[in-house]
Amino acid sequence: MSHSPNSIKILIVDDNKNNLFSLRALIEKNFKQAEVIEADSGISALSMLLKEIADLIFLDIQMPQMDGFETAEMIKSRI
């Protein structure tokens, strides 16, 4: 799905693949204009955000290596 002016890009970040699947399904069912992108870690999310802009980010808090709070702080420091 290409990012059109009427769509929103949502990044979901979770180390649990079942959570990513469920959240994606909920978003896509209820927000037809949303483009969902996924990351399975904070580090992966940061890497993805270097290439793409997300309008909204859902972050898991408990993740290995870099938790959601650390990831959010890194994202915030980029702005």
Image (spheres, helix red, strand yellow):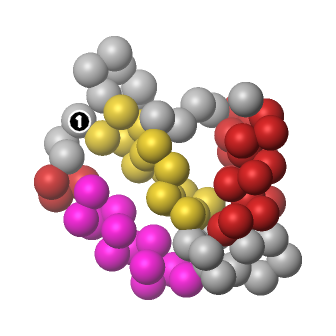
Identify the image quadrant of the N terminus. top left
At mark 1, the secondary structure is loop
Q: In the figure, 63 relative to 10: above or below?
A: below
Residue 52: % across, % down: 63, 32
**Magenta segment range?**
16-27
Q: In the figure, 2 relative to 26: above or below?
A: above
**Residue at the location (35% across, 63% down)?**
24
Indicate yes or no whether the magenta region holds residue 20: yes
Residue 62: % across, % down: 65, 82
Q: Horizontally, is 76 left or right of 13 in the view?
A: right
Residue closer to the observer: 11 or 56: 56
Residue 49: % across, % down: 69, 40
Q: Horizontally, is 10 left or right of 71 in the view?
A: left
Asked whether the viewer can see residue 1, the reply is no
Based on the displayed image, in which of its 4 quarters is residue 45 positioned? bottom right
Name the residue beneath numbered marker 1.
Answer: 33
Rate crowding at label 1 as few (under 14), some (14 to 19) or many (20 or more) other CA atoms within 10 Å.
some
Type of amino acid at the residue the image marks with label 1: Gln
Asked whether the viewer can see residue 24, the reply is yes
